[in-house]
Image (cartoon, rainbow, N blue to C red):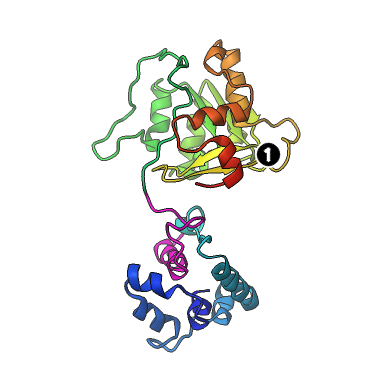
Amino acid sequence: MAYVLVTENLYDKAFIEEWCYGFAAFRRRLLGEEDGILRTPFWAESICGVPAVTIERLAREFAAAAPAAAALSWTGVAQVPNAMHATQAIQALNALVGSFDAPGGPSLIGKRKLSSAWGDNQPKPPNNTEKFKLNSSKLWKGWIPAYFEKDVQAGRLKAMLCYFGNPVMSNSSEPSMRRAMEQLEFSCAIDCFMSNTTELCDVILPDCTYLEQSRVISDWMYESFISLGQKAIAPMYDSRSVVAIFTGLAERLGFGEYFPWQSEEEYMTNQLCGQEITLDELYEKAIC
């Protein structure tokens, strides 16, 4: 794709000159001036299996959509061997079309915090147990998954509620995770997929897919952007949105007064308290 952008002069020359470095070497690499290998769509086809005509089409469509275009490199390509170089190549596409920090393009890190689920004038759930950390480390502030089985055997962990995760697969020792889960007094998974973890749980609450529920979405770490995911269809079968699931659990546990929202829209409206944009504006603009 980068070869097409450069050789067909579809890249943003002004953005490259002002914000980027190393373009001359990058161009030489694409044109095979270093090793005699042209990085053409036909060359890429033999490696990735995607037809060259498809690669050419995607490159031209990407350029035509710029700057409201973004090539992302998170789950998948960023978690395999050679991930660093693959990610660099993908991010180079954003630089070539000048989409960084442009409306509709990938957002650079900034700070924008969503409101708590509970507004200033709403009662918050009480802390019914003293907070403590398991297995704290000087190098890592969070819980250490490698100690999961040890913590269960010692009675420090008795139950687990797993939402949209698969720790049996993602943590380092699957046998250890399985043994630990089998020793828990209770385990529950909220997910829309049957995974290594959900198949071991006592209870599975079927979550909706992203196509069946609306959400206000922010950058997972820095909340540098806010966008709106709009559901395309009603929830299928016996699935429910995660807002409905947690609200229902709170009511059953006697904490319903702290979860007063009657719909996803009420919940999302509350999330946006204090922001410069309302839910209605998000529905209109889709991203801010």
Q: Which residue is mark 1?
A: 212
Which residue ends up furthest to the right in the rendered image?
237
Number of numbered discs: 1
Which quadrant of the view contains residue 204? top right
Q: Secondary structure at mark 1?
A: loop
Q: Position of residue 123 (x, y in %)?
A: 46, 14
Q: Is residue 165 left or right of residue 34?
A: right
Q: Nearer the viewer, residue 70 or 143?
A: 70
* Amino acid of disc 1: Glu
Check if residue 38 falls in the magenta segment: no
Check if residue 87 falls in the magenta segment: yes
Which residue ends up furthest to the left in the rendered image?
138
Q: Position of residue 68 (x, y in %)?
A: 53, 60
Q: Is residue 161 left or right of residue 57?
A: left
Which quadrant of the view contains residue 202? top right
Residue at image x 41%, y 20%?
155
Residue range corresponding to the magenta coloring = 80-109
Q: Position of residue 152 (x, y in %)?
A: 43, 25
Residue at image x 29%, y 38%?
140
Q: Is residue 50 left or right of residue 110?
A: right
Position of 267 relative to 138 (above/below): above
Residue at image x 45%, y 70%?
96
Which quadrant of the view contains residue 132? top left
Position of 212 relative to 157 (above/below): below
Instruction: Report crowding for label 1: few under 14, some 14 to 19, many 20 or more residues within 10 A (C-alpha).
Output: some
Which residue ends up furthest to the top in the rendered image?
254
